[in-house]
Amino acid sequence: MQTQAPVRSPDQRMEALKRANDIRVRRAKLKRDLKLGQVRIDSILSDPPDFVATAKVFDMLMAVPKFGRVKATRFLNQARISQSKTVGGLSERQRSELIGLLSR
């Protein structure tokens, strides 16, 4: 049995597309700021803005200077966090453990 998405009006669809585009733009700016060192990853993880809630933790770590795939994966493994975990989906334990690892 297949379920289909509910039918949306053109106005609803355009509004959803605008929201999605706004989130993409804001995340791209945040990643640039992380790369430039203007924003700290621990502040993002401790109190995430609403547009970051559905972003993958792995992607946010990859935007941090001197972080590549290997280092980001190692940090997530040490904190026992899946690479597919979103920032908003982190438990308090995972959040505090990851922030602790990053502050070393």
Image: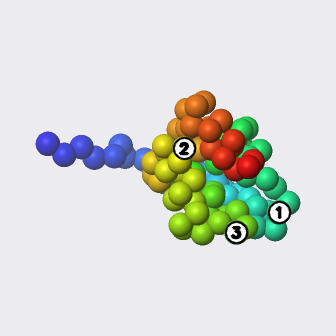
Q: What element carries label 1?
A: loop
Q: Quadrant of residue 92?
A: top right
Q: State which tag comes first along the sequence, 2 or 1.
A: 1
Q: What element carries label 3?
A: loop
Q: Residue 66 — which label?
A: 3
Percent x, y of residue 91:
55, 32
Disc 2 or disc 1, which is closer to the eye? 2
Q: Residues within 10 Å of mark 1 (few under 14, many from 20)?
A: few
Q: Mark 1 points at which residue?
A: 37
The reply to whether callout 3 and callout 1 are in contact (CB within 8 Å) is no
Q: Examine the rendered structure and indicate whether residue 62 appears above or below residue 43.
A: below
Does residue 18 appear anywhere in the picture?
no
Percent x, y of residue 31:
71, 63
Residue type beneath disc 2 = Ala
Residue at 85% across, 60% down = 38
Quadrant in which the N terminus appears: top left
Residue at 70% across, 69% down = 66
Q: How crowded is mark 2: few (under 14 residues within 10 Å), some or many (20 or more)?
A: some
Q: In which quarter of the image is residue 6?
A: top left
Q: Mark 2 points at which residue?
A: 79
Percent x, y of residue 49:
71, 43
Residue type beneath disc 1 = Gly
Structure colour scheme: rainbow
Separation (CA) of disc 2 from disc 3: 19 Å
Residue type beneath disc 3 = Lys
